[in-house]
């Protein structure tokens, strides 16, 4: 599959790289993003320990504490310095001055590094952000890297959709300034082609998270089948303030109906999140289940704290089957050879599931049918042994493909 379709690449891209900056939306509590960062750090520390690494991100204090790497803000120390000024004209003038400072500081910084890498994540989409947020920040850094003659790599990234035309322009230009691009799936590359971007020199490699070390399997104390239910505080693509709560409540109601059905059939549930903000859904779901299902033992619904990707994988390892919404909830379950049903908000879930042979087990978070979900679950449980073996084969291929990409970027065998 992956190994068969990879293009032959001669030589490697690395050019005596000594100092590398890892750029992305890290330190904001999104476990999938943190997993991508951890995956590339894990590789560098094991295989290129002499390389100096730092992270350019949204939450440098959090990244430094959790990943033990030097981190700086992508805003170069000018975050919201003008927001407290009430006079609009003064505020805009000061903002322009601070923006100039950011450009100067960024240029000076980029002259000191050999390479900037965007490690994975769905960086080229506008989910929940406006044009002057991540789309602009990405444009700014990639353009200045071009001016500073510093290589800028997009490595196993996700792309699309990008609905806002200004966001699309910013992100398309950022991709154009890059000296290396690879996508984590076919649908990302096809999206870039759909917006008239030339991808002839671009590669497709698996999501970087597949290269992470997985937790050691733990022997469970019960024979009861455990279902991981990956939930999300979902308010629509743009976190819509008008219709977002309505979308959230509809999703919650369906999850309660499905979870109640599982409990009545004797399963236990383990609630999973992919970001700290998802705790609201966990709390609401638990309250609703307590009202709807009076007879189940409370210990059959487990909601242990999840504060990192390691916590998430440890929780998934204690399940037999997973039903999830967030992309990296689904991905981590697949990586741990757990059969999955995806209730995704974007086609990236569907594409990943199809790559793993589970295309029949996908629905959309805003339109999924509970009765169909029940039927999918019954079928998945019946065929779980077959899918576990299939996932094991796929995961081996993914790890080999990622090893090839790491060697291409950083050198080595």
Image: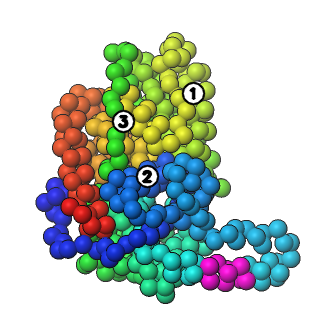
Q: Work out whether mark 3 precedes mark 1 in sequence or the reverse, and give the earlier one.
A: 3
Q: Mark 1 = which residue?
A: 286
How far from the left and from the top, in percent, is residue 250? 54, 41
> Would you say 137 lies left or right of 260 here?
right
Tell me, yes or no, whether the highlighted magenta stretch contains residue 356.
no
For the record, the magenta segment spans: 96-105
What residue is drawn where x is 63% and y is 70%? 75
Quarter of the rendering containing residue 383: top left
What residue is drawn where x is 32% and y is 57%? 47
Tell me, yes or no, whether the highlighted magenta stretch contains residue 101.
yes
The image quadrant where one finds the N terminus is: bottom left
Q: Work out whether mark 1 precedes mark 2 in sequence or the reverse, and give the earlier one.
A: 2
Q: Secondary structure at mark 1?
A: helix
> Would you say 206 lies left or right of 63 here?
left
Of the residues tagged 1 and 2, which is closer to the observer? 2
Q: Work out whether mark 3 precedes mark 2 in sequence or the reverse, and give the earlier one.
A: 2
Q: Secondary structure at mark 2?
A: helix
Query: Which colour style is shown?
Result: rainbow
> Would you say 137 lies left or right of 51 here?
right
Can residue 85 be seen in the rendering of this structure? yes
> Would you say 119 lies left or right of 381 here?
right
Q: Secondary structure at mark 3?
A: loop
Whole-number angstrom distance, CA of label 3 to CA of label 2: 14 Å
Q: Mark 2 = which residue?
A: 38
How far from the left and from the top, in percent, is residue 283? 60, 32
């Amino acid at each position: 599959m992956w190994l068969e379709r990879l293009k032959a690449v001669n030589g490697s891209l690395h050019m005596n790289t000594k100092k590398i900056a890892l750029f992305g939306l890290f330190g904001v509590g999104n476990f999938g993003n943190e997993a991508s960062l951890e995956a590339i750090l894990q590789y560098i520390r094991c295989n290129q320990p002499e390389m100096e690494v730092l992270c350019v991100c949204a939450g440098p204090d959090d990244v430094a504490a959790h990943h033990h790497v030097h981190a700086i803000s992508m805003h170069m120390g000018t975050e919201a310095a003008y927001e407290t000024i009430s006079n609009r004209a003064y505020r805009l003038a000061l903002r322009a001055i601070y923006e100039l400072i950011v450009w100067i500081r960024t240029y000076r910084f980029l002259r000191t590094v050999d390479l900037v890498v965007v490690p994975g994540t769905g960086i080229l989409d506008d989910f929940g952000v406006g044009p002057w947020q991540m789309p602009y920040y990405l444009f700014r850094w990639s353009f200045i890297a071009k001016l500073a003659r510093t290589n800028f790599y997009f490595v196993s990234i996700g792309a699309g959709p990008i609905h806002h035309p200004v966001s699309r322009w910013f992100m398309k230009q950022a991709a154009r300034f890059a000296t290396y691009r690879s996508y984590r799936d076919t649908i990302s590359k096809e999206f870039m082609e759909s917006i008239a971007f030339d991808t002839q020199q671009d590669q497709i490699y698996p999501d970087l998270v597949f290269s992470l070390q997985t937790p050691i399997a733990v022997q469970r104390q019960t024979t009861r089948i455990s279902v991981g239910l990956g939930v999300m505080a979902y308010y629509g693509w743009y976190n819509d303030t008008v219709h977002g709560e309505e979308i959230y409540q509809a999703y919650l109601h369906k999850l309660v109906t499905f979870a109640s059905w599982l409990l009545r059939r004797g399963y236990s549930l383990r609630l999973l999140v992919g970001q700290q903000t998802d705790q609201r859904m966990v709390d609401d779901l638990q309250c609703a289940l307590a009202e709807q299902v009076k007879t189940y033992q409370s210990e059959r619904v487990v909601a242990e704290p999840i504060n990192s990707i390691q916590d998430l994988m440890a929780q998934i390892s204690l399940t037999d089957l997973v039903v999830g919404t967030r992309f990296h909830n689904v991905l981590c379950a697949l990586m741990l050879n757990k059969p999955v049903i995806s209730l995704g908000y974007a086609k990236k879930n569907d594409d990943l599931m199809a790559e793993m042979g589970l295309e029949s087990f996908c629905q959309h978070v805003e339109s999924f049918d509970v009765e169909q979900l029940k039927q999918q679950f019954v079928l998945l449980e019946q065929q779980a042994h077959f899918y576990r073996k299939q996932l094991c084969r796929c995961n081996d291929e993914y790890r080999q493909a990622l090893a090839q990409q790491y060697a291409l970027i950083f050198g080595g065998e």
